Amino acid sequence: MIVSAYVFADGVEFAPEAISAAAQAVRVGKLVGLPTETVYGLGADADNATAVAGIFSAKGRPADHPLIVHVASFDGGMSGVSHYAARVPSFAQQLMSAFWPGPLTLILPRRDGVGAAAAGGQNSIGLRCPEHPVAQAVLSALRQPTNGEPVVWGVAAPSANRFGRVSPTTAQHVAGEFADHQDLLILDGGPCDVGIESTIIDCTRGAPVLLRPGAITADQVVAACGRPLISPEELEAQGQQAPRASGTLESHYAPNATVRLMDAKAMQKALEMLGTEVDKSPQSGTSIAVYARTPMKIAARSIEQRRMPSDPAVAAHELFSVLRELDALRVKLIWVEEPPAGTAWDGVRDRLQRAAA
Ligand code: TXA
Ligand code: MG
C-alpha cells in the first residue's frame, strides 16, 4: 500500500499521519518501504531480530548478508553511532562530518548485543545517516517518541527489491517488487535523487577500504580523510579476506533483459551488422535496446533507443528506472555504451558491470 509522505497544498509539507504510521509500523515490528536519497529501502527495527528476519525472507536474501542500519541525523548521527558502534576510528569520524547526512555507509566495529540480526552475524555494523527528509522524519520520530513508546535506535534497510534484482528508485517500483505483500506500507517520497546505492567504506581495518562505489567518489573520500583508499583486491593481496557484501557480488542489480557493455565503436559496428534484420520478425520487434551517450546510426526501426546522460550524476539518477522501463517493454537484450574513465563514473560503471555479469 503506497502512502504519500507529503501533502501538496500551499507548498509541500509532510503528511504527519503518514510519517507516524510508518514509525508505528516499525515500532511494532513490521516492515516499511522507505524513501532515501539513494534508493528505496525495505526497513525494520534494527534491534528486533524477528522483524529483521522478515526483511531477509521478503527479499529472499541469504541471512548471512549484513544489512545497512540507518540512524537519525539530529546530532550528526552520533547517538546512533554510539549505540551501534564499539569504536570509531578518526578517519571514519572525518568521513561522517564531511558526508552525513548523505549517501555514505561506514562499516564499524559493532557493540556486543546490538543490531546482531541486521549485521548478519558479523562483528561489524554498516551505518548510514540518510539525507532524505522523509527517511529523517521517520528516524527521528523513532528516536524521540512522544507518547512513552520505546526508542528505536536504527532502521535496518537494504534496497527494497528481491535479492539480486535492480534497486527501486520510486515507491511504484517497491510496490511492484512486493506485489504479494499487500499490507506493506510504502511511504512515497518521490523519485530518489541519487539513484544508485550509497558508497560503502569499511572502517574496521585500520585504513579505509572501498567496498562499493557510489555518488560520493573515491577522490572525495580521500580528500575528506587524507588517507589513501584500499580496494578489496588489495586487501586480498595482503592476505586479508574482504568482507562479504551482497551488493558486491559479481552478478547483482540485474534486469530480466541481458545487458551487454561495449564501447561506442563496437556498438555502432554491431548495429551495422544487425541492419534491419530485427524489423522483419514482429516477435523480436522490441527485443533490442540501445543505451548510449554517443549518438548511434540505427537502421532498424524496432530498436528501442535511450540516450545515456553525459553527466554521471544524472546518469546514476535515471539508471535503474531506465533498466526497469526496458524490462517492462520486454526487451531481451540491452546494449549499453561503457561509461567513460574517471572516478565520477565508478558508481554507474560498477552497477552496469554487475548488471551485465
Ligand atoms: O543506499 C543504500 O545503501 C541503500 C539504501 C536503502 O540506504 N541500502 C542498501 O542496502 O543498498 P543493501 O542491504 O542492499 O546493501 C548493503 C550492503 C551490502 O552489500 C552489505 O553486505 C553491506 O552493505 N554491509 C552492510 N553491513 C555490513 C557489514 N557489517 N560488513 C560488511 N558489509 C556490510
Ligand atoms: Mg541491494
Image: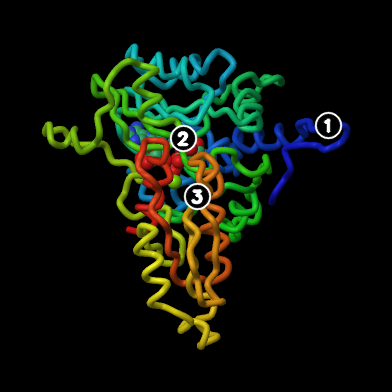
Classify residue 325 by image quadrant. Answer: bottom right
Query: Mark 1 packing: few (<14 Cα in 10 Å), some, or many (20+)?
Result: few
- State the residue in front, 330 or 162: 330
Which residue occupies 48% across, 53% down?
Answer: 293
What x and y, as percent, mark residue 315?
Answer: 51, 46
Give the number of the mark in front: 3 or 1: 1
- State the residue in front, 42 or 295: 295
Say which residue label 1 marks.
Answer: 11
Residue 329 can be seen in this image: yes
What x and y, as percent, mark residue 176?
Answer: 60, 58
Give the number of the mark in front: 2 or 1: 2
- The amino acid at mark 2 is Ala
Say which residue label 2 marks.
Answer: 215
Which residue occupies 58% across, 22% down?
Answer: 151
What x and y, as percent, mark residue 254?
Answer: 42, 58
Question: Can you tell which mark lies on residue 318?
Answer: none
Say which residue label 3 marks.
Answer: 167
